[in-house]
Amino acid sequence: MAVTDPQARTIAIIGGGPAGLMAAEVLSAAGQRVEVFDAMPSVARKFLLAGRGGLNLTHSEAPDTFVSRYGTRRAEVGAWLDEFGPQQLRDWTHELGITTFVGSSGRVFPQEMKAAPLLRAWLHRLRAAGVTFHARHRWLGWADDGALRFSTPAGESRVGADATVLALGGGSWAKLGSDGAWVPLLAARGITVQSLRPANCGFNVAWSDHLRQGFAGTPVKNVSATCIAPDGTVAKHDGEFLVTEHGVEGNLVYALSAPLRDAIESAGSAKLHVDLAPGRELRRLTEDLMQPRGRDSLSNHLRRRAGISGVKAALLHEYAAPAELAAPERLAALIKSLPLRLVSLRPLDEAISSAGGVDFAALDANLMLKALPGTFCAGEMLDWEAPTGGYLLTACFASGRTAARGVLRWLKRAQPALAGPLPDR
């Protein structure tokens, strides 16, 4: 039902992604007048694109394991998830008429595997609750009188609001709206913003012309990989990755991108140790490779004795010296731990998400900027990161809810006669 209370306060939400829309839902449900502004022609474009291959909403793993995925920010993000975690997200999705299921990997998807039906149902509910949307409104910061400035097709517009939620996204996928243009606007107000860096990203490798020309675009399947972060922590992930013209990308690489990125920033390069035969014990693999080759070529010997062929064999030849290929013990060791040297990160705009953002020291527990009372932040623009697998989306939804409830608490303190009670959920 649309807001009709003449005492309702006007809340501006800048950014129409999952965090901003969730803030709009909580605030409109509490009887506030909500205006959503987005720079793009329509809202949630990155959300829609992320769901084209199957919308991974969240993950079904145990809560302690789930919150550990947020690394050094597990305490901050964990506080959001205590209020609105994976199960609450699934329940909310079901309320929209979208059923979910748990895949074989533990990931949670909508039954239709798409983002569009969920977004349509959500926007219908928000509009019915009185939320107003303003497309093609790019935020330009604040006017001298505190009004919000926007660039629009009709020229500059200024909007007054009783409170503001900034949900402007990170720095990746600029064509969908997450371009990091907000960073200097906050920095000019004295807000500490950690540099935006690629997360869940690909890396550059100095491939030989032979490997690049023969295997770019080829997946390397059924492998395991480890890397060592600058603090000595060892990270490991199983799965597959893709050899690209420039280097490597794919789910296995994305899962390890944070420690790999940190190693590159610390030392100038990083080593990704790939186990090309994770199901084979080193001792047994060595014994198999020591068997006489007879008339077999090295390629046939590797295929028959170690199950190594195609792109895996090409990677071995890329990194192994001729003497190592001829020595079974050394060859087996390389198969079990092939050191791919990553020389740099792919550009931020190619990354699935970004690290860095508004420093948590600049925020209170309600995600309000300490230096700008009444202004709250949510979503990927905050300084946290997570791997793919539903963790990014879950935390974005949860942060939007936390910020919205923070707005209501702040209104209640600042204008108690005009602020209603907090919603139950």
Image (tube, rainbow, N blue to C red):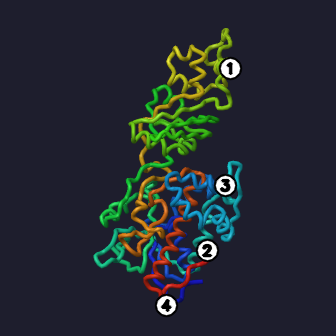
Mark sitting on residue 62: 3
| Nearer-N-terminus badge (3/1) | 3
User: Badge 2 is on which residue?
Assistant: 425
State the image coordinates of residue 200 (x, y, percent, origin top left).
51, 48
Categorize mark 4 by other alpha carbons within 10 Å: few (<14), some (14-19), many (20+).
few
User: Badge 4 is on which residue?
Assistant: 6
Question: What separation in Å lies between label 2 and label 1 (alpha carbons)?
Answer: 59 Å
The correct choice, above or below, for 330 with respect to 272 in the image is above
Categorize mark 3 by other alpha carbons within 10 Å: few (<14), some (14-19), many (20+).
few
What residue is drawn where x is 44% and y is 67%? 377
Front disc: 2 or 1 = 2
- SS category of the residue bearing label 2: loop
Front disc: 4 or 3 = 3
State the image coordinates of residue 93 (x, y, percent, origin top left).
65, 66
Left or right of residue 270, residue 151 in this image: left
User: Badge 1 is on which residue?
Assistant: 305
Q: Is residue 43 visible?
A: no
Residues marked 4 and 3 touching at CB (< 8 Å): no
> Mark 3 belongs to which amino acid?
Ala
Front disc: 3 or 2 = 3
